[in-house]
Image (cartoon, rainbow, N blue to C red):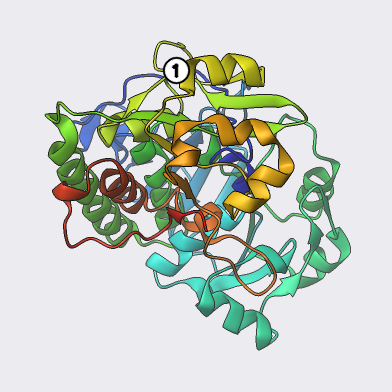
Amino acid sequence: MIFRLLWLLPVFLCTVSCKNPTTSATSDTAEGKELTRHAESFSLLDYGSYKILIIKQAWPDADKEFKYLLLGKDEVKPNQETFDAVIEVPVRSLVVTSTTHLPSLEMLKAEEKLIGFPNLNYISSPKIRGQIEAGKVRELGKNEDINTEVLIDLSPAVVVGFAMDGSNPAFTTIQNTGIPVLYNADWTENSPLGKAEWIKFFGALLDKDAEAEDAFSQIETAYQEAKSLATNTTDRPTVLSGAMFQDVWHLPKSDSWGAQFIADAGGDYLWKSSRGTGALSLSPEAVLDRAVDADVWIGPAHFYSFDAMSKSNKVYEQFKAFRNREVYTYTAKKNAFGGIEYFELAPNRPDLVLKDLIKIFHPQLLPEYQLYFFEKLQ
């Protein structure tokens, strides 16, 4: 599932190149009106009577783009191009394959369009859990081994999938039946607002572009306003992130999604000079040497308590942030089956993640704000 890739569990796994997103308003181009402004992995072009959705980076180092034509029921297909799929919008139903897709459906008030999902236990949304209990959303097995027989029997208008590379036999089987598979690459974005802008992908499929733009603009404004609070702070706490997995400590490089959150929240990330978007894999000794006196420790993998950390490895006890009880986890909000809300909602609501971190680093800047995703370890 994509949610495993979002914050360190134990590592940020953003591996595509990071570009500087444009923050200009929606622009007109010779190809059509571009409806995105932060996302780097997809483009949405509005031609008035139809739209073209281009997935520019479906997975890291992808060597091809995917182009989808989105047409209203009575619109005529343009004949100047070929497409990987032609989709009639609004779609009548859909299957999605990552929990990160679900908040967009909710924000667009289209969760009833969902008819199938792989591994329902991961879903945290109360609304969608209600649909599951009512038998309106079918279980499709594991994402890496989707039950294609059940999916094909459901006959969704589209399947929204994701891929770590270009090989997925299940998707090929689905497409061979005439059901379009569209790649959603929200997880390849490196900027917080770039990830959140993928709501426009679903807005296009649902013919709710105005609603998607409105929802994203509110998130964008909230994020930028919060960021501006922390921009001029001079007292920046030093920050450690992550934890060990099989005796290797994984930390995000400075251009990754998580490291950008720390910078925007006014934190001094101790590996901010590590250029790139991938992950560092360090020995516990190397991390201890640099971060023994770190002020704050965020995202300590799956740990939920100081006692659990101590039992796992005594080296954790040597860090000042551990001794001072300044360790914050994102695993607090779970559903009854263990699904963690952070993995589902955080990519869509970077404004809440940023406010959480500002509250942790500079509580005086948001005196009335209550942490949403993060909380101190118990």
Q: Secondary structure at mark 1?
A: loop
Residue at 66% over, 88% down: 134
Residue at 62% over, 38% down: 84
Q: Is residue 285 left or right of residue 215?
A: right
Q: Position of residue 95 (x, y in %)?
A: 65, 62
Considering only vertical position in the picture, is 197 above or below 237? below
Viewer-nearest residue: 226 or 88? 226
Viewer-nearest residue: 200 or 29? 200
Residue at 74% over, 30% down: 166
Q: Position of residue 58 (x, y in %)?
A: 59, 32
Residue at 75% over, 63% down: 119
Q: Residue most toward the bottom?
A: 134
Q: Residues within 10 Å of mark 1 (few under 14, many from 20)?
A: many
Q: Is residue 207 left or right of residue 133?
A: left
- The residue that mark 1 highlights is 271
Viewer-nearest residue: 166 or 235? 235
- Number of numbered callouts drawn: 1
Task: Look at the image and tell me whether residue 109 can be seen.
Answer: yes
Res 141 → quadrant: bottom right
Q: Position of residue 90 (x, y in %)?
A: 47, 64
Q: Position of residue 371 (x, y in %)?
A: 34, 59
Res 334 → quadrant: bottom right
Task: Kindly identify the amino acid type of the residue bearing the numbered disc 1.
Answer: Trp
